[in-house]
Image: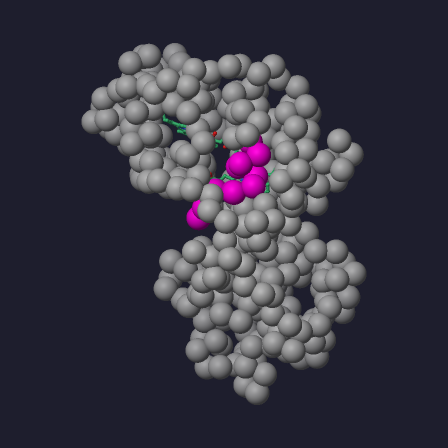
């Protein structure tokens, strides 16, 4: 239990908050609400941690996916989360729920899209059209969440607003967004060596204008890469995300790295060191704070974060993951 608590603080607190209340960064959900913790089976909880939620800030933590934790550590953490939440388990039916997709889709646009996004892709609330979510969430689990909400969060209970039939229509609609997904093990690329940390070592030093003495607009970084300027890029997300895809030349320095190791191999001269994450600041801020404490002056964070970088069409390269 102590070990699980330490792992929570090391890996999860950054976004899910010191007391599992959620919302510390990037709209991470509460991990203590009764309706979540009493209905999410242990294997679903462990899978959410192990495989993450693709295309959201929730990374896969399982070592097989390039993450930092073993399956045993993940299960221990899941058990600890259940124990801390202290709610009795509600056994939900495994049976599929049938409903009218047309009505469900209309209701979704009216009542849910403002937070979950018009395609349920996630906005200020979690993505529901997420392949890894739908691979594990049963229909009854989804319906229970809509009916009862998530205590102490923005997700209010809809049981007085919607009829049982409308709840079924919404559930069937969300289920229809399933795209097929399986947690196939990946081939992991080797990590770069210190001699390769600097991108374009012969290039000129780029000029960056920082906001709040810290944030650099992504367009300036994209331009520096295009001009083959000398730069060090730090990918501060969970290491599995680096294996998925990263900005060319970026090296994995995840937010949970120790202070002793954070600067290993990084030049402390006038080379710009630029960090990014998807949260879009929390993980990078943590790493940049550690480096500045150690006397690294030319450090900054990409203001818009990794997802906006992709959406703007700037270059990324994939790992060897299939
Ligand atoms: C005001 C914003 C808001 C609206 C409107 C809203 N939700 Fe949510 N919803 C949230 C938030 C925030 C969460 C995550 C809560 C948490 O656990 O911290 C959530 C969670 C959920 C979950 C659980 C997801 C999971 O990963 O377990 C489901 C299912 C869901 N909402 C469905 C709906 C549906 C269907 C509607 C429309 C009838 C709706 N929501 C309307 C904000 C909203
Ligand atoms: C960089 C921020 C970040 C970190 C760090 C992080 N998470 Fe998350 N987590 C999120 C976000 C954002 C979501 C919602 C994703 C979505 O849109 O579906 C999420 C979703 C989840 C869910 C699904 C909850 C639900 O309502 O369905 C679980 C469980 C979870 N995280 C556990 C963890 C654990 C345990 C750790 C530490 C090992 C962790 N997370 C680390 C951001 C983070």
> Which residue is at 38% across, 23% downward?
139
Image quadrant assignment for residue 290: bottom right
Q: In this figure, which colouring scheme has been used for the structure?
A: one colour
Secondary structure, magenta segment, majority class? helix
**Where does ligand 2 appear, by image quarter?**
top right
What are the residue bounds of the magenta stretch?
A: 45-55
Q: Is residue 214 magenta?
A: no
Q: Nearer the viewer, residue 130 or 150?
A: 130
**Left or right of 171 in this view: 282:** right
Image quadrant assignment for residue 138: top left
Q: Is residue 46 magenta?
A: yes
x and y percentages locating residue 262 in the rendered image: 72, 62
State whether residue 142 is above or below residue 114: above
Decide if residue 101 is in sight here: yes
> Which residue is at 48% across, 62% downward?
319
x and y percentages locating residue 152 in the rendered image: 56, 24
> Which residue is at 29% across, 14% downward?
165
x and y percentages locating residue 100 in the rendered image: 23, 22
Q: Nearer the viewer, residue 237 or 185?
A: 185
> Which residue is at 55% across, 67% downward?
250
**Left or right of 150 in this view: 87:** right
Q: Nearer the viewer, residue 63 or 32?
A: 63
């Amino acid at each position: 239990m102590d070990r699980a608590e330490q792992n929570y603080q090391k890996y999860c607190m950054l976004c899910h908050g010191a007391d599992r209340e959620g919302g510390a960064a990037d709209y991470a959900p509460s991990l203590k609400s009764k309706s979540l913790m009493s209905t999410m089976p242990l294997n679903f909880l462990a899978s959410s941690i192990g495989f993450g939620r693709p295309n959201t800030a929730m990374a896969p933590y399982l070592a097989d996916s390039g993450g930092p934790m073993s399956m045993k550590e993940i299960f221990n953490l899941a058990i600890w989360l259940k124990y801390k939440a202290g709610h009795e388990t509600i056994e939900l039916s495994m049976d599929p729920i049938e409903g009218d997709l047309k009505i469900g889709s209309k209701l979704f646009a009216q009542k849910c899209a403002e937070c979950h996004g018009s395609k349920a892709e996630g906005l200020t609330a979690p993505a529901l059209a997420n392949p890894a979510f739908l691979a594990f969430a049963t229909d009854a689990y989804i319906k229970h969440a809509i009916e009862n909400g998530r205590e102490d969060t923005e997700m209010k209970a809809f049981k007085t607003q919607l009829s049982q039939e409308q709840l079924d229509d919404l559930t069937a609609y969300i289920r229809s967004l399933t795209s097929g997904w399986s947690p196939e093990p990946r081939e992991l690329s080797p990590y770069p060596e210190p001699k390769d940390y600097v991108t374009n070592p012969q290039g000129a030093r780029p000029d960056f204008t920082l906001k709040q003495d810290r944030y650099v607009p992504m367009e300036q970084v994209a331009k520096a890469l295009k001009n083959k300027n000398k730069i060090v890029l730090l990918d501060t997300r969970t290491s599995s995300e680096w294996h998925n895809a990263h900005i060319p030349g970026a090296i994995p320095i995840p937010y949970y790295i120790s202070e002793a190791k954070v600067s290993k191999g990084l030049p402390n001269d006038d080379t710009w060191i630029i960090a990014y994450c998807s949260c879009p600041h929390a993980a990078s801020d943590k790493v940049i704070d550690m480096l500045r404490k150690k006397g690294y002056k030319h450090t900054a964070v990409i203001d818009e974060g990794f997802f906006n970088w992709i959406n703007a069409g700037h270059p990324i390269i994939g790992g060897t993951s299939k």
